[in-house]
Image (spheres, rainbow, N blue to C red):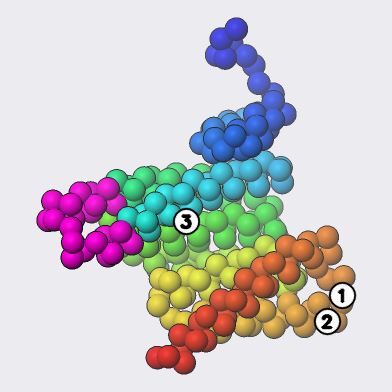
Amino acid sequence: MSPMNVTLSRLDRLYLAKVADQAERYQDVINQLKDVIDANDAQLTLDERNLLSVAYKNLTANLRSSWRTIDTLQKKEALSSTRQEVKLMRLQKEFIEKDIDVLCRDVIDLLERTLIPAASDGEEKVFYSKMRGDYYRYLAELTRLNAKENLGETSLEAYKLAYQHALATLPPTHPTRLGLALNFAVFFHDIMHSPERACHLAKHAFDEAIAAASQSPSAAGTNLEDSLMILQLMRDDLILWHGEIKRD
C-alpha cells in the first residue's frame, strides 16, 4: 500500500514521530508534528511539544558542532594550509551556516506564526518564547551571514518578553523558568560579550530558586530532578564567568 493512501490520525502521527525520534530521523519528527499543528489549531500536547523541541535542538546542535569542528581545523592548520585549502574550508563553513540559517528561520516562523499565538499563558507560552529567543541567538552567532540584521537585539527582546512572562506566571524553581534564565544568561555572555550581566542574571535566578526551595522543599514538585540539573549547569557557568571577570 502506498503511504500516500494512508489516513493518519493524530495518535498515528505522534507514534511515527516517536519512532522517527528513536531512529534519529529528526526532520521526519518535525514533518509529522507540523501536520499535527496544521490539523489541530496549533496547540500541541506536552509529548508532542517536547518531541518537536528536541528534534529542532538536535538538528541545530549537529550543525553547530560541525561548524565548530571546521572552525577549529581552520585555526589549527592556518599556517600549514594552502590558500586553496583555506578557501575550501571557508566554503564548507558557509554551507553549514546557510543550513543553520534555514533551520532557525523555519522554527522561528513556526513559533511566531502559530505556536506562540495559540499557547496558553504560563508554562506553555514561556517554553515557546524561550525557544524563540534561543533560535534568534543562534542566528545572531552567524554575524557574517546576517550582518544587515540586528538579530542580537531581536534575540534580546525575545528573551526579555519570555522572562517577564516567566517571572509573572512561574515559581522560581520551575525548570522552564530556570532553563530560560540560564539561556538568557548565555546570551549575555556569548552575544553581548558581557560576563558581568550574565553572572548577575544567573546568580539572581539561582539565589531565588534556592531560597524558594528552602522555604518550601516541595516547591519544585515533580520537576525536582530537572530543576536540580539546570541549577548545576547554572552554577558551573557562574564559576567560569566569574573566572573570566577576574582575569580581565
Q: Is residue 21 above or below residue 198?
A: above
Outermost residue on the front side: it is 80
In percent of width and height, residue 89 lies at 24, 52
Quarter-wise, where is residue 226 in the image? bottom right
Q: Secondary structure at mark 2?
A: helix
Q: Which residue is labeled 2 in the image? A: 214
Q: Looking at the picture, which amino acid does disc 3 mark?
A: Tyr
The CA span between labels 2 and 3 is: 34 Å
Mark 3 packing: few (<14 Cα in 10 Å), some, or many (20+)?
A: many
Q: Which residue is labeled 3 in the image? A: 135
Q: Residue at x 43, y 54 (%)?
A: 65
Q: Residue at x 57, y 82 (%)?
A: 239
Q: Looking at the picture, which amino acid does disc 2 mark?
A: Ser
Q: Locate the C terminus and report the quarter of the image it occupies.
A: bottom left
Mark 2 packing: few (<14 Cα in 10 Å), some, or many (20+)?
A: few
Q: Residue at x 79, y 65 (%)?
A: 224
Question: Which residues are drawn in magenta?
Answer: 71-94
> Is residue 94 in view?
no
Q: Is residue 224 above or below residue 215?
A: above
Residue contact at pointers 2 and 3, CB within 8 angstroms? no
Residue 195 inside the magenta-drawn segment: no
Q: Which residue is labeled 1 in the image? A: 217
Quarter-wise, where is residue 164 in the image? bottom right
Residue contact at pointers 2 and 1, CB within 8 angstroms? yes
